[in-house]
Amino acid sequence: MTKKGKQVSRRDFFKLTGATGIGCILGSMENTARAAGASATGSSGLSTVPTRPFGKTGVNVSILSLGGTYNLKSRQLLLRQALKMGVTYWDTAHSYSGGNSERGIGEYFARYPEDRQKVFLVTKSGASDPDGLSRHLYSSLERMHTDYVDLFFIHAVSAVDDDVNTPEIKKWAEGAKAEGKIRFFGFSTHKNMAQCLMDGARLGWIDGIMASYNYRLMGTPAMQQAADACKKAGIGLTAMKTQATWLSNFYSDVGKGTETASQLTEQFVARGYTPEQAKLKAVWENADIASICSAMPNLTYLQANVAAALDKTRLSAEDHRILNQYARETASGYCAGCARLCESAMAENMPVSDVMRYLMYYHNYGRQQQAIRKFNNIPATYRQRLASMDYSEAERICPQNIPIASFMQHAVESFSDKGRG
Ligand code: SF4
């Protein structure tokens, strides 16, 4: 197969994505793959998503990972088609969808046991001690009808020395590998990401990390240094939250941000892809990111993301300029997860960045129940004072200039009465 033959032509890619965005993508999955060229790397003879090395593990993973935050019991066709399209990296967690994400994967492997070997399977545990990790791991294996997972993460780490770097956890990871229950070990982080990546890189026993990483964050010196450190340490990196969605309903200068958002759409549609696809492409341009984990609730999202993964066109200087302009103009509606800054500026350690994330789940991801549940899991002593704290110093040092007090007030009003019961 020639190099040319593996590429998606601009015309074909435009046909796939259409002129009106992700929701209007036309054509079957077969058309998607055919339009990408006939590289015929999949067992079905259709083009498949490219792969990249995952750190120094010796494993190549698909550059697009199926984020399984949903109930996958009712999404068996999505799993089947993802695999056919080469999305062989599947991400789940013990907690996702009350266990129905893992159970859905289990139902799939029970039906198609031969597919287990094709999947790079990742799950996560929020436990903080070896007994809890073992309990979750064995439960995950049973739910997913498998004897092992390829990568096991400690979930949502915010400080590596507190959450990961203990002799007990290191010993546990080594033991689980020796037993053949996990192949690789690491953690996920969406809070203090740059510091967590740096700290993970120095440990020497972390195989993979999944971190919030997107066009807003990836150009900052701290994130660049952290990604470099992981590369040197041979850690496989997976990017998540790559859309970096903007909480526009609270943005103080909505008119300006909306105007740039329209320009963003016009610019990318003229180039043949949607802003959502462009944001994925921006992350893939860093070859040190092995994969992007994307929550894909249906075949439309899967097709759009696969089309973006198959397309080889690089973003232009103008594409980058307008993305950066959009990031700047909407910064005060996006929390960068640098919790150490704002939370240490408070008289009490209020969970500001967690609450910001729950607002994003609620308003941007359509995961209202999850947001409400998580908010109401915050100890009552914090929740009750969340709206009345003095955030002036935290707002002063917030690099995104977020009106933190307004956001906290809104979260209390939105979530407090709904999550009980
Ligand atoms: S509110 Fe500001 S300082 Fe706090 S985590 Fe978000 S971006 Fe960082």
Image: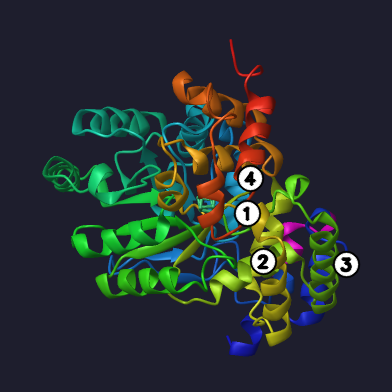
Residue designated by label 1: 334
- The residue labelled by disc 2 is 327
**Label 3 neighbour load within 10 Å: few <14, some 14-19, many 20+:** some
Main SS, magenta region, reads helix
Q: Mark 4 = which residue?
A: 78
**SS class, disc 4:** helix
Asked if 275 appears above or below 73 in the picture, the reply is below
Position of the N terminus by quadrant: bottom right
Residue at mark 4 to residue at mark 3: CA–CA distance = 24 Å
Q: Which-is-in-front pick, marks 1 and 4? A: 1
Q: x, y percentage for residue 131?
A: 20, 28
Q: Quadrant of residue 45?
A: bottom right
Q: Is mark 1 within 8 Å of ligand 1?
A: yes
Q: Which residue is mark 3?
A: 19
Q: CA distance from mark 2 to mark 3?
A: 23 Å
Which is more foreground, mark 4 or mark 3? 3
Q: Earlier in the sequence, mark 1 or mark 4?
A: 4
Q: What amino acid type is highlighted by mark number 2?
A: Ala
Q: Earlier in the sequence, mark 2 or mark 3?
A: 3
Disc 1 residue type (three-letter): Tyr
CA distance separating discs 4 and 2: 32 Å
Task: Name the front one of labels 3 and 1.
Answer: 1
Mark 4 vs 3, N-terminal side: 3
Disc 3 residue type?
Answer: Ala
Is 163 included in the stretch rendered in magenta?
no
